[in-house]
């Protein structure tokens, strides 16, 4: 009986992951960003009684001493439709010329289990000298438009109409 209770407590404390999938990640960065995103690993999973969770891991390097940074993650579902956006904030000192690993897990996203594509970019940085650097989101939007295969393209409709003889 004691063993059964221990097993039951374990499964209640650590619900089984019922679905996990890698998410295609795209990094948007610019030469003047104070932090360089070197690698992104993302996956989605669904636990019992959840809408879906996201795991994200970044390998980054900085040009200056950083006290905090926010990375924005834009998610699209398996049908290339917008799903959600969240900001992953790191409140730790990042020294110049060192590569560190940051990760966030159990990020709750509505229907996060459907996430298929992620776009990750540096949004804000607090430098050690107190300066706050902010990303120009217009240039981020321009770069997003260039990523092939994420958004519905007008040419896709034209090709479909040609095939159907319209």
Image: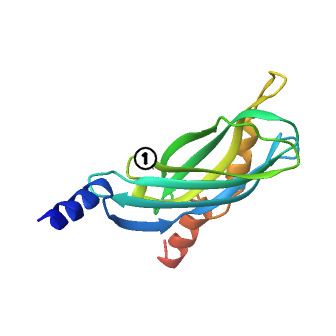
- Point out residue 40 in the picture as x, y percentages from the top left corner: 66, 58
Residue 47 in which image quadrant: bottom left
Q: Nearer the viewer, residue 127 or 95?
A: 95
Residue 151 seen in the figure: no
At x 19% / y 67%, what residue is drawn?
Answer: 3
Binning the other alpha carbons within 10 Å of mark 1 as few (below 14), some (14 to 19) or many (20 upward) gives many
Q: From the viewer's perspective, is 124 left or right of 95?
A: left
- Point out residue 161 in the picture as x, y percentages from the top left corner: 51, 70
Residue 140 in which image quadrant: top right
Q: From the viewer's perspective, is 54 left or right of 27?
A: left
Q: Nearer the viewer, residue 5 or 101?
A: 5
At x 22% / y 61%, what residue is drawn?
Answer: 6
At x 36% / y 59%, what residue is drawn?
Answer: 46
Residue 66 seen in the figure: yes
- Point out residue 115 in the picture as x, y percentages from the top left corner: 47, 58
- Point out residue 166 in the picture as x, y percentages from the top left corner: 49, 71
């Amino acid at each position: 009986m004691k063993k059964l209770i221990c097993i039951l407590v374990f499964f209640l404390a650590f619900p089984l992951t019922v679905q996990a999938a890698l998410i295609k990640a795209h990094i948007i960065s610019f030469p003047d960003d104070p932090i360089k995103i070197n690698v992104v690993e993302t996956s989605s999973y669904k636990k019992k009684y959840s809408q879906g969770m996201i795991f994200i891991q970044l390998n980054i390097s900085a040009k200056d001493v950083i006290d905090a940074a926010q990375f924005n993650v834009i998610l699209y579902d398996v049908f290339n439709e917008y799903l959600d956006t969240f900001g992953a904030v790191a409140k730790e000192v990042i020294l110049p010329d060192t590569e560190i690993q940051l990760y966030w897990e159990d990020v709750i996203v509505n229907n996060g289990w459907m996430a298929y594509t992620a776009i990750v970019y540096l949004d804000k940085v607090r430098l050690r000298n107190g300066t706050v650097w902010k990303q120009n989101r217009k240039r981020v939007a321009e770069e997003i438009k260039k990523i092939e295969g994420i958004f519905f393209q007008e040419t896709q409709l034209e090709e479909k109409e040609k095939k159907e003889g319209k």
